[in-house]
Amino acid sequence: MTTRASHGLVIGKFYPPHAGHHHLVRYAAERSHGLTVVVMAASVESIPLDVRVGWMREAHAEDTNVTVVGIRDDLPIDYESDVLWRGHVDLMLEAARTVTSEPIDAVFTSEPYGDELARRLGARHVLVDLTRGANPVSGTAVRADPVSTWTLLAPCVRVHLAWRIVLVGAESTGKTTLAEELAARLRDRGGVWTRTEWVAEVGREITEKKLAAPGSSGHMDDLVWETRDFVEIARLQAERERAAARRGGPVLVCDTDAFATSIWHERYCGARSPEVDALGEAAPFHLYLLTHCDDVPFVQDGLRDGEHLRRWMTERFVERLAAEGRRWRWLRGSREERLARAIAAIDERLGDGWGFAAPLG
């Protein structure tokens, strides 16, 4: 059996990390007393260095002999240039020395350049699955088509990449029904789409709790709302979105979000709240689908504010979506027409791609 390395090294862009990367790291960890993983990201790339480091740390949290560090590497790649080779290796060593001063005695790669890298580090090279037979995936493939590689991505990466399709609009305009049906229609596509989830509206749940609380009259008009209520709603909404994105598919359907919660704060508290607005600004989104109050008759189910507010809410959504530069589409017409328009809007968004910046070559 090959002697375990005292200090093993794995390097990569991890842009983004996938099952092949994790296989390499775990293979190396099993054959090293200590393993340093160096994430090397260029400034021009669209996933920040700290995000990639965080992903790798989470994915390998149970590999107790693995330490993940990151370093900015804006040097171009040219395997024929000794100057650039030395520049890249110096950055690797700089990052590795933040972990330990122990010399690197084994380099683990799945790349043809591994022999030369090991030579320059004075270490032995361990080649792992050069043909990608164990995990037929690459960072290039993921960036080109995240949908086809979705099952080869760790949950923490899916949280970042899953598109939030958010249904917003006034009360009793069919948002919840559309969210459920939209998720079901996407699941019917099969494959990775069977993972499609939808996230229900937390505000409705909080309203039910307030109405059922001891001392409550049980009437909507008597409820008292404070900014802290909306902070909690926005926080819980975002928390549940993240949980659903970790286990779900490439598209996550959301029945409202923290941005919409900030508009409801305007309605109940009479003004905007910087704290609630900040939560809305931090919420990831990729497309808003706005329902219209003229398309669905108002139905009072005991939890709704009132028909007289629907037009104001509709207009306020239009104003805020436009002012904040959020991508959105109307959902107008009958129930089936709105569903068809929602599917078409999602497919249009999918056609635009994820927009990864090209890696520094």
Image: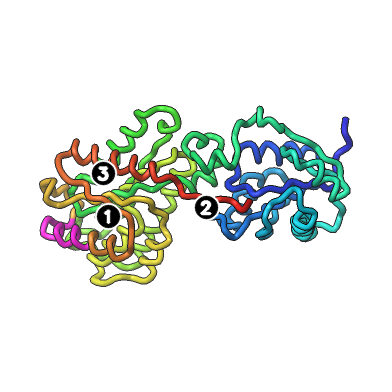
Residue located beneath label 3 in the image: 176
Residue 315: say if magenta.
yes
Q: Within 10 Å of the Cα at label 1, are there few (<14), some (14-19), or many (20+) other Cα atoms?
A: some
Which quadrant of the structure image shows residue 234? bottom left
Q: Is residue 201 left or right of residue 131?
A: left
Asked if 79 appears above or below 184 in the picture, the reply is below
Residue located beneath label 2 in the image: 357
Marks 1 and 3: which is nearer the front? 3
The CA span between labels 1 and 3 is 16 Å
The magenta stretch is: 305-316
In terms of secondary structure, where does tag 3 sit?
helix
Residue located beneath label 1 in the image: 207
In terms of secondary structure, where does tag 1 sit?
helix
Pick whichever of labels 2 and 1 is earlier in the sequence. Answer: 1
In terms of secondary structure, where does tag 2 sit?
loop
The structure residue drawn at horizontal position 32% and vertical position 49%, both measured from the top left corner, is: 166
- Kind of residue indicated by mark 3: Thr
The CA span between labels 2 and 1 is 43 Å
Mark 2 in CB contact with mark 1 (< 8 angstroms): no
Res. 205 in view: no
Q: Main secondary structure of the magenta part?
A: helix
Which quadrant of the structure image shows residue 340? top left
Q: Position of residue 13 (x, y in %)?
A: 64, 49
The structure residue drawn at horizontal position 54% and vertical position 40%, both measured from the top left corner, is: 142
Q: Position of residue 188 (x, y in %)?
A: 34, 28
Of 235 and 75, the residue lying toward us = 75
Label of residue 144 in the image:
none
Pick whichever of labels 2 and 3 is earlier in the sequence. Answer: 3
Res. 9 in view: yes
The structure residue drawn at horizontal position 57% and vertical position 58%, both measured from the top left corner, is: 44
